[in-house]
Amino acid sequence: MSVRRFLIGVAMGWCAFLLAPRAAAQQIACTEAALQQAIANANSSGGNRTITFNCSNTVIPLVSSRTNRMITAPNVVIDGEARNITFEQSPRCGPPDATCPDIEGGAWFVSLQGNNGVVRNLTVQYFFEGIHVDGGNGNIVENVTINRPCDDAFTNYHPATNTIFRNSTIHDACDKAVQLYGSASVTAPNWNATLDRVTLTNCNDPIRMGDVSSERGRFRLTGVLVNDPAGGLFQCGYNLWDGGGYIQMEDSTVDGCKGWHIGGSMEARIVGSTFSNNVMRGVLLYGNARVSFERNLFTMNGGGSSANPGYGGVSIKETAQADLGGGSLTLQGVAVTSAGLNTFLGNRGPTDTTLDIENLTTTNVKAENNWWGDLAPADQIAGTIDFSPFLSSAPSAGLAPATVTNFRRTDVH
């Protein structure tokens, strides 16, 4: 390439950069009227606006209906700039105790419906609905804290694609913390939504999938923490994925809930994650669900009982299918294999102190190349399970160190 052609190319690139739409910044007063007017202005002008605020350490009450805070234009940013700005529904959606009003379609803080919108660096509390992504592509919600929502804190609706919720925290959700709806039209490498480093603390129903097959879609969870510390306002209940979509869960932790339920026609791949101290079971598969597990840690799950059978570290019932090592499942139309490398330590049932995997189906479940805390796993399973060959120590690629012993067992050899 000649120097002249190179210089012409550089000049054209700079021209394209300078002429591209750029978000105009608008610092507004910290009032409901100013926020709604700024959103209306952004929509009417075709977007490309950044909305910031001229205050710090402020609680801004919002009293009007949800229709006043719908962002339909592209490239609209609402940025709290880490100024400790909190938006609060007034009146609050419910009392600050365990009461959860049964109201659907209540007010939200904001709804993103255009492309490439962003909400970041702020707190939202006491809303029926927190932040909706109801359409568009590439919307981002980041560095947001949501306190005491009465319905969905984060929602991704059917038309929305490639949404990212990241570096955010939801506290004390009395209903669903995250509601995910998808669309069968979304295929790899795209996702309906990604949860990236999102923490859900003391949330009654942490992540809920659409519960009918028409709401199938593709969702990715990475670095998600779901926990239930002592003294929280609500208990982490039964998380439910019961539609027809696909979930890829990586490097995540579920600690102190009642159980992670995957049913309907759901397909999932769970890798490098930890399920610990969950009251009824670690993961329960039912219906026609198909789930592949690899490099996960299941520890100290179970011990409680309920009217819904299926206990221990992992339980499979009805016509569900699981591959915990050495098998193959068809997920998203592609054959997926698991190398195993899962670790099982101290899981139990209501009457069985050594229940790592429970197979209540009539088919064989593959669970090869896993570490069971000792060298005699036969009495740590129930049902037809192919656990041989098994590992003689914790996998180096797993989550449990080799020095961990099965300290709650009565069958250590």
Image (spheres, helix red, strand yellow):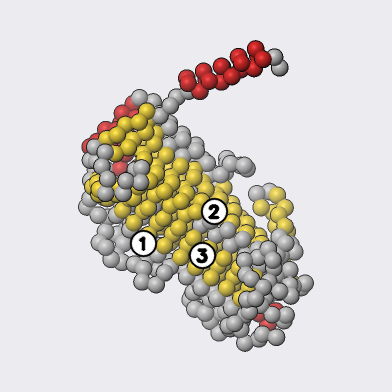
**Is residue 403 found left or right of 41 in the rendered image?**
right
For disc 1, the marked residue is 172
- Looking at the image, the residue that sits furthest to the front is 3
Residue 251: give its label: none
**Side of 144 where 365 appears, left or right:** right
> Which mark is first along the chain, 1 or 3?
1
Considering depth in this image, is 232 or 283 the residue closer to the camera? 232
Residue at 62% over, 70% down:
400
Q: Quadrant of the N terminus?
A: top right
Image location (x, y in percent) of residue 153:
38, 52
The location of residue 402, given as percent across then percent down, is: 67, 73
Q: CA distance from mark 2 to mark 3?
A: 12 Å
Task: Name the residue rendered at 64%, 71% in the picture.
Answer: 401
Three-letter residue code for mark 3:
Val
Q: Is residue 271 visible?
A: yes
Is 56 left or right of 215, judged from the image as shown? left
Q: Nearer the viewer, residue 339 or 211?
A: 339
- Whether residue 265 is visible to the viewer of this picture, yes or no, is no
Cα distance, mark 3 to mark 1?
16 Å
Q: Quadrant of residue 150?
A: bottom left
Question: Could you say which is closer to the camera, residue 404 or residue 281?
Answer: 404
In the picture shown, does residue 342 fall above or below 355?
A: above
In the rendering, at what x and y percent does residue 396 appear? 69, 66
Number of callouts: 3
Residue found 72% across the figure and 57% down from its top: 337
Question: Which amino acid type is marked by label 2?
Answer: Leu
Q: Is there CB contact under 8 Å for labels 2 and 3?
A: no
The quarter in which the C terminus is drawn is: bottom right
Depicted 354 relative to depicted 333: above or below: below
Label number found at residue 221? 2
The residue identified by callout 3 is: 254
Q: Secondary structure at mark 3?
A: strand
